[in-house]
Amino acid sequence: MRVLIVILFFISGPITAQAPIDLALDTYNDRSVPYISVEDLYKNKDGYLIIDTRKKKEFLVSHIPNAVWGGEKLDASAFAKAYPDKSKPIVVYCSIGVRSENFGESLQKLGYINVYNLYGSIFQWKDKGYTLINYQKKPTDSVHVYSKEWAKYLQTGIKVYK
């Protein structure tokens, strides 16, 4: 019996666990926009233009300090006018990093060359203990979770649905 167990272990290979947010990003994203970790962004947050690509109501509940609201769809002419330097480092984020990849792809098509997608986005930012602010620019623990389905990816904070 012991021999069988050992053989099954070697046949099946080592068991590796992948976090749910990693699985979601592997499922929905194709890594067309390079990722940046929340830790790396936090260390150099003043070096990036940080763009929130969620719905306005999500942004108003909370967002990363110094982030600007970009909306879910890029307004190419308005963005190019507001941010003409196409070499400026840009970080895009949403709830976990799916919608922001789409936004980042649109920026790349416009010729922006230093675009990064925040891995795990605002959920990961909150789960790592970094500060979020609300529309009044006050710290908050509230995070709009987009939907009940996506809420499972946020481990900390107060989940807001409306």
Image: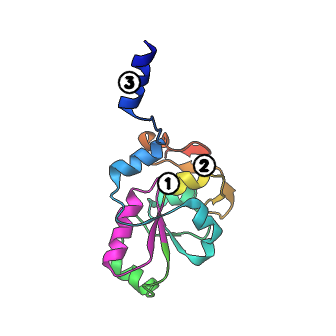
Sooner in the amino-acid sequence: mark 3 or mark 1: 3
Judged from the image, the secondary structure of the residue bearing numbered disc 2 is helix
- Residue sitting farthest toward the front: 3
Q: Which residue is mark 3?
A: 8
Report how far apart the C-alphas of labels 2 and 3 lie in the structure.
Answer: 37 Å
Is residue 4 part of the magenta span, yes or no?
no
Report how far apart the C-alphas of labels 3 and 1 lie in the structure.
Answer: 35 Å
Judged from the image, the secondary structure of the residue bearing numbered disc 1 is loop
Observer-nearest of 29 and 144: 29
Residue 133 in picture, x, y percent from top left: 64, 60
Quadrant in the picture for residue 11:
top left
- Residue sitting farthest toward the top: 1
Report the disc number at residue 120: 1
Residue 130 in picture, x, y percent from top left: 65, 57
Observer-nearest of 151 and 121: 121
Task: Magenta stretch: give its range.
Answer: 91-118
Of badges 3 and 1, nearer the viewer stands 3
Report how far apart the C-alphas of labels 2 and 1 lie in the structure.
Answer: 9 Å
Q: Is residue 121 visible?
A: yes
- Residue at 58% x, 56% y: name it: 125
Q: Are the two marked residues, 3 and 1, in contact with CB atoms closer than 8 angstroms?
A: no
Q: Which residue is mark 2?
A: 127
Q: Are the two marked residues, 2 and 1, in contact with CB atoms closer than 8 angstroms?
A: yes
